Image (spheres, helix red, strand yellow):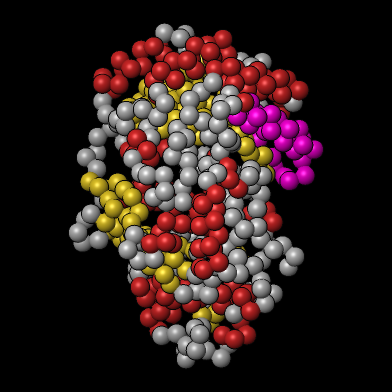
Amino acid sequence: MRPLSFLAVSSLALIQSFAAGLTLPSSEAQIRRTRRSVNAQTQQELASVISSNSTIFGPTDANWANETESNNHNIPFYAVSRGHALTTSVGLFKGIEIDMRSLDGIHINSNSVTAQFQGGVYSDEVINTLWNQGFVTGNVYVWTTRKPNGTAVRVNENSHPDLWWAMRGAGHNFGIVTSFESKIWPDNFKTYFVKSYQFAGSSLDALIEQVNKFQGNGTLDPTWLGSFGLYTMNTTLSQTEATITWIFLYDGAQVDAEPALKPFDQLRPLSVDEVNVPYKVINDQIGGAVNGSLCEPNKTHILGTANLQTYNVTAMRAIYDLYNQKISQHPELGGTRVLVEGYAVQGVHSFKSDDSAFPLRDDNILTYFDVRFDSSDDPLIDFATEWRNQTVDLWNAGQPERKPTAYVNYAAGYEPLEARYGYEPWRLERLRKLKSQYDPNNRFAWYNPIIPPNTGY
């Protein structure tokens, strides 16, 4: 498989995206070019975003037939930007990776209410670029999506509305987004109040009861961005049991948030931290910094998740006790994280269940179990996998009246399709019908696919 095949597969899509989307600054990268097939302006624009040893040519060039071998020879391809895909299906991939990271253009439209983004941007870039110009991002309202043959499809509620429905919840099954447009809003540069508690295990039951009162069953006031809990080892506080961290984020002044947090102050926390921060660093406060441990590359993860409506106190206690038991057996796994995320979900609930392919509008809490290893052959992987399964089973046992569900961006790949894409039969039926229309050869089948990939190669 020659390196040129990477560009041949993606070049048509890249050329079209530059023609229809943003214009990036040129560079002086030295690139071999075939002048007959691609005009000079496009060559110059592409030169700034692809590697210096690439060849640029288009579909009218004589080389095109030789180099577009991915589709012709059934070679798998996969688009990569930040590399955060941890699901097991991605681990099956062998083929051509299309590196999207250089497609990072961001342009605020002249109306100052919308902005254009290229498909390789990531959240930290978007947040900081907009914030530095006085804006925050809102909802995406249109995508430019590439079909398996490289042709562009503009997708919104009026153009290809069937694909608009599918991509909001299952989009990775249908194409590569090379650009999109989003609403933006002025940021008044106010601060957000963040309060972080750390508790010992003796406070857990009372803590969970109080969090349930605070959040309700999906009724948390949207002025609260959410609350986030974490079990992990902090040996500066305890050598023998996990520390429980709980963080609250408030969209407003500290004085307005404090009354709601007084019950937590009374639970004898080990430590309390308070900070008022601008919007652009909120994610850093909950461990999601772009250079933080959550984004560290080249790790093997054992993941598990189960969506909830409220916390079951008994289940959360059992998961905590299990954590301590496992760490007593293998202290070297003390970096293991058991994370829960309770957001204000009134906006999620405001949509009808059938408005999009996203099926989990009754779920109010996301959970995340994660053990990280430096290699895929670590002897403790089986131990961690068993621990993962036990933890997920406990979360689900705490809500016996509900079928297990898994947020698709946290799903590890072993969960039933219905848990990720909905138990109503019509949902998967509709997705599979659209799949046969837009991707009949199942080329987009590597991230929690609705139709498993053919790995026979």
Magenta stretch holds residue 28:
no
Is residue 25 in sight in this rendering? Answer: no
- Residue closest to the eye, 427 or 20: 427
At 27% from the left and 51% from the top, the residue drawn is 184
- Image coordinates for residue 406, horizontal then vertical, percent: 56, 40
Where residue 296 sits, quadrant-wise, is: top right
Highlighted range, magenta: 371-396
- Image coordinates for residue 127, horizontal then vertical, percent: 36, 47
- Image coordinates for residue 120, horizontal then vertical, percent: 46, 59
Magenta stretch: helix, strand or loop mostly: helix
Vertical placement of residue 438 versus 305, above or below: below
**Residue at the left extreme?**
111
Magenta stretch holds residue 378:
yes
Q: Using residue 93 as the reference point, say whether residue 359 is left or right of it.
A: left
Vertical placement of residue 58 versus 251, above or below: below
- Image coordinates for residue 69, horizontal then vertical, percent: 63, 78
State the quadrant of the N terminus. bottom right
**Residue at the front extreme?**
425
Where residue 195 sits, quadrant-wise, is: top left
Q: Using residue 418 as the reference point, say whether residue 58 is left or right of it.
A: left
Q: Using residue 130 as the reference point, say whether residue 81 is left or right of it.
A: right
At 47% from the left and 68% from the top, the residue drawn is 146
The count of marks equals 0
